[in-house]
Amino acid sequence: MMKTHNCYVPHEAEIIERVQETPDIFTWHLRFSDAEIAQHYRFRHGQFNMLYLYGVGEVAISVMSGDGENLWHTVRAVGRVTKAMMDLPVGSRIGVRGPFGSYWPLDIARGKDVVFVTAGLGCAPVMSSIRYVVEHRQDYGRLVIMQSVRHRHESLWEPQYEAWRALPNTQVLLTASRDQTRWPNWELGRVSVLLEKADYNKEECVVMMCGPDAMMRDTAMTLKGLGVTAANIYVSLERNMQCAVGHCGHCQLGGKFVCKDGPVFPWPEVEALMCVKEY
């Protein structure tokens, strides 16, 4: 972790590079201003940082990849803080707290098939994990990546997905739920369409999933019906995480706090709560 790590205090970071992915989604390449903090910063795949815009507020954003000198975050401008962040130019400075939360079970997945299921910007929390598995292919079995978006033009990093499609022992399945045109290498429909085409060992796999609650709930139920052990299904939840340390209570889910106990959970830990409508 960081030197004299205080989870309540943001450390300054500079925006080194900025990429406008879509009209309302942008990616930041950040670097900590303090060289010692940059040297010691480490995150585990699936964790998040709290990004703080001085005088406006802070938001929880998944760590896409990197270290203290090359830290990447992809942000959707949907609220007061993130919309203000979208206007910041390269060279601006923000505050960063973290990393926080639980992480994807990449160690548990070694030797097994690995399945990633995402929808919308839900792909961001798993991108670093996909890259890790790609870089350590000898440690894992078959790699299956399923990504659903509403429209193809909303897809992020499609060239990256195409590069992964060319890898051995790897299957990439993409679908658009609201498009009317069938594109090459794309399906029409929701994630369920992809589940029918996915090829992996359902008895020896680990599934990592992120996206809308309804999608994860329905997909987890389908996977269980197909023979995937519930304990091998992991989900990353999104809630209103304002403090990141379980004090404010905004992200409470039953007896758990998503910021502290999650955001990554084994499906059996949250299944009962996720099946309660509007919870």
Image (cartoon, rainbow, N blue to C red):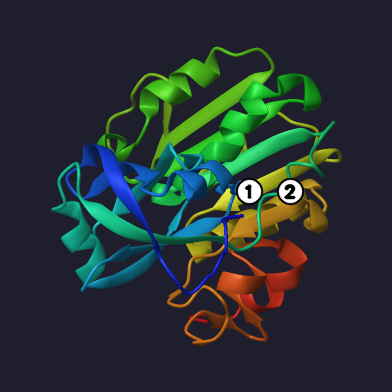
Question: Looking at the image, which is closer to me, 265 or 27?
Answer: 27
The residue indicated by pointer 1 is: 44
| Residue 133 percent across, percent down from the top left | 66, 30
Q: Is residue 3 above or below residue 117?
A: below
Q: Earlier in the sequence, mark 2 or mark 1?
A: 1
| Residue 136 percent across, percent down from the top left | 70, 24
Which residue is at a point 47% across and 77% down the rendered structure image?
A: 243
Which residue is at a point 25% across and 62% down the rendered structure image?
A: 82
The local crowd at label 2, few if under 14, some if 14 to 19, many if 20 or more residues have their Cα within 10 Å, is: many
179 sits to left or right of 104: left
Q: Quadrant of residue 117?
A: top right
30 sits to left or right of 260: left
- Which mark identifies residue 124? none
262 sits to left or right of 53: right
Task: Give, as a three-letter code, the residue at label 2.
Answer: Pro
Q: Is residue 47 above or below residue 152?
A: below
Residue 4 visible? The answer is yes
Position of the N terminus by quadrant: bottom right
- Which mark identifies residue 105? 2
Q: Quadrant of residue 134?
A: top right
Q: Secondary structure at mark 1?
A: loop
**Disc 2/disc 1 C-alpha distance (Å):** 10 Å
